[in-house]
Image (tube, grey):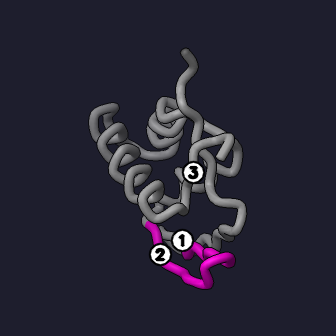
Amino acid sequence: MSETRYHRHPDLRLLPQEGEGIVLHLGERRHFSVSDAGLVLLEALKEPRTFGDLVEGLLAHHETDRDAATETARAFLDQCLASAVVVEAGE
C-alpha cells in the first residue's frame, strides 16, 4: 500500500511577502494569508507530496525539531484539506 500524496488545488496562486504569504483561490474567489511555514508547505505541494515529504521540507527550511515540524504539517494539512485548498492526488 502506498502513502497518500497531496497537492494544492490548481486554482491557487501564491504571493510571497516578508515572513508570510498571500494565497489566492481563483476558483472560489477568496484569499487568505499563511505563515512562512504554510508558504513552504504550499510551495512544496505544487507537485504531489506525501506527509513525510512535507515534514522533511519544513525541517529543511526552518530551525525546528521533528516533533514540531510534524505537528505543524499535520495541523496545516488538515486545515487545507477541510477547506479544499489541498486535495489528495488523483482527485
The answer to whether residue 30 is above or below residue 19 is below
**Disc assigned to residue 21:** 1
Principal secondary structure, stretch drawn in magenta: strand
Q: Quadrant of the N terminus?
A: top right
Q: Amino acid at mark 3?
A: Val
Q: Position of residue 8 (x, y in %)?
A: 62, 55
Q: CA distance from mark 2 to mark 1?
A: 6 Å
Question: Residue at position x 39%, y 58% from top?
Answer: 79
Q: Nearer the viewer, residue 68 or 28?
A: 28
Q: Are marks 3 and 2 in contact (CB under 8 Å)?
A: no
Q: Are marks 2 and 1 in contact (CB under 8 Å)?
A: yes
Residue interval drawn in magenta: 22-34
- Say left or right for 52 vs 28: left
For label 3, the crowd category at 10 Å Cα-Cα, with few meaning under 14, some 14 to 19 and many 20 or more, is many
Outermost residue on the bottom side: it is: 29
Residue 29 shown in magenta = yes
Residue occupying the far front of the picture: 91
Which numbered disc flags the more N-terminal residue, 3 or 2?
2
Residue at position x 28%, y 34% from top? 67
Disc 2 residue type (three-letter) = Ser
Q: Nearer the viewer, mark 3 or mark 2?
A: 3
Residue labelled with disc 3: 87
Q: Is residue 79 left or right of residue 20?
A: left
Q: Earlier in the sequence, mark 2 or mark 1?
A: 1
Say which amino acid is labelled 1: Gly
Instruction: Label 1: state its secondary structure.
Output: strand
Residue depicted at 31% across the width and 35% down the height: 65
Mark 2 sits on what residue? 33
